[in-house]
Amino acid sequence: MATTPGFLTDWPWKHLGSFKYMLLAPWGMQSIYSVATKGKNEWDYTNLIVIPLLVWRAFHNQLWISFSRHRTAKGNNRILDRSIEFEQVDRETNWDDQILLTGILFYVANSILPNGSFLPIWKIEGIIITIVLHIGPVEYIYYWLHRALHHHYLYSRYHSHHHSSIVTEPITSVTHPFAEHLAYFCLFAIPIFGPVLTGTASLASVVGYFTYIDLMNNMGHCNFEFIPKWVFSICPPLKYMMYTPSFHSLHHTHFRTNYSLFMPFYDYIHGTMDKSSDAVYETSLTRQEDNPEVVHLTHLTTPESIFHLQIGFASVASRPQNSKWYIWFIRPLTTWPMMLNFIYGRTFVVERNNFEKLKLQTWVIPRFSVQYSIKWQGQVINNLVEEAILEAEDRGAKILSLGLLNQSWELNRSGALYIKTNPKLNIKVVDGSSLAVAIVINSIPKGTTEVLFRGSLSKTAYAIVSALCQKGIQVSAFYEFERLKLSFRSQSEIALSKSYTERVWIVGDGLSKEEQLKAPKGTLFIPYSQFPLKKARKDAFYCHTPALVAPPALENLHSCENWLPRRVMSAWRVAGILHGLEGYNVHECGETMFDVDKIWDDALKHGFRLLQFASN
């Protein structure tokens, strides 16, 4: 929102939420009706192309968003090192409003302009007129409009909304109040309706111009430089006809320079070009890829989880992963990446963070959870994990933490397999089990005297039971009772539960809905598993999987980690960070467990805190 919101700041369909696209329904139905009732020679392709054009623009923008976020996370050619927070993501979630506005105005114009209907596919005269009108009136008028928007009166009421984003993303380019977009549309309408009025317009000039606008807008708001120097060496005039990401980035940091739309020519002739433009451009081009000190290695969960990654849909990634009605519409898009992953897949970077001088990155194994249960995929996955460990070491990382099923005992004995096959590893492999234990223990309400234990008996489970027994808390169990008794022969606190009366349950994978329904009202379920428990009760409380709230000093955290809330990180990810901060310099994998009390104290010392109790 602008500093002092002015007239027509909000979009008129803001209250409609996700149903705003229903505004196009009448025109869409009219187009379908015309196709169904008229002959092919009578179809108005100008009308029919509106919806495909809107879909193309959305797809084009999303490609830039994913590409930009991936490149920015890697670090090569990055321009600014500042972080992006959830506030910016929320502010920019309505980037599709301007696409919707385009569709509405196109339908209206098509119905009232005589020359706007039945356009041919191609007319070279119209394309030339479009180019000339953009270079002349559009670029020049925009330059002075942009300068006017930086006047205090208009800036505080409108343009400050756009400049709230210091570190730009492709979608920052279209994050403006409604009134500002109306002004831009009137300006960009000149090259579109000019050929229409002269009878030289074509579908190619219309679609091509909008594609050009989106291309340059998205490119200029990327936070990395990628236009090579040889482009300007081969054709020196391009320096004045095409801006670069670093050129426009300076406008977002210095505010009073580099006002041009896409052509810096007008900044040169009016003396508003930033003097550091060339230096920033060259510095960004030579910047190398980041060398992280701590890497967290996770993987995809469900086919839809790729859209929840930071390089996926920004608004979806900024919220915990759960079932949404609109996910059903994009599920067909998940088929091709699934097939591609079975044939080929390589670990990729999805996120970068900074914390107390540590450079952190999150890498993703391109495999889904279901693939981890397929036997013939086991060796493939292990190879991918091992390659990621070796690559992280080559890039100077000191710690690599294993997330989700990358530390499965059945797969690699909680990471011990990689230590065995690579005995000279300098990088330390961390499974985070000790911190997971600490979080579970400290999630139990004070004064609790007994708990019910239900879940698979992993090393984390045994460590939890041992810690509870040492605290004098009775651990009751059903199926696990005999094995626990054999493992803790001297522990009198382990008992066979005769009923489901315990009010605190420590649970792992496999707790059924029927078992949950047997728990008394108000039961607190505390999972120690990697994956969340499927909730079957509304009168009970469910803790999240072991996780901690990140301190404010942890930067660039603007996406949710799987199903966890904002700014909450899994125990396994935090454990790697703590190993890096404290310099533990030991592996924590296989049967090895770190000191539970020490790692808990270290987590609190560095500002991590327990997630507020539970959700029901």
Image (cartoon, rainbow, N blue to C red):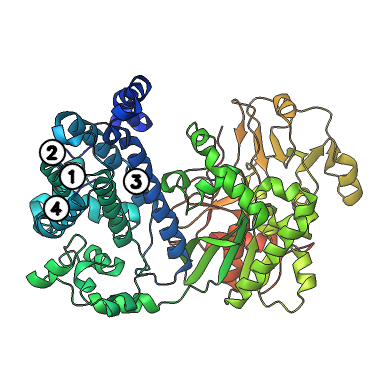
Q: Is residue 37 above or below residue 299?
A: above
Which of discs 2 and 3 lies nearer the camera? The answer is 3
Q: In whole angstroms, how far apart are the C-alphas of marks 2 and 1?
A: 17 Å
Residue 552 appears anywhere in the view: no
Instruction: State if disc 2 and disc 4 touch (CB < 8 Å).
Output: no
Query: Mark 1: which amino acid?
Result: Phe
Sequence-wise first label, 4 or 1: 4
Sequence-wise first label, 4 or 3: 3
Sequence-wise first label, 4 or 2: 2
Query: Mark 3: which amino acid?
Result: Arg
Which of discs 4 and 3 lies nearer the camera? The answer is 3
Determine crowd level at label 1: few under 14, some 14-19, many 20+ residues with C-alpha closer than 10 A. some
Mark 2, secondary structure of its residue: loop
Task: Residue 57: give its label.
Answer: 3
Q: In whole angstroms, how far apart are the C-alphas of marks 4 and 3?
A: 28 Å
Q: In whole angstroms, how far apart are the C-alphas of marks 1 and 3?
A: 15 Å
Residue located beneath label 4 in the image: 155
Task: Residue 7: give its label.
Answer: 2
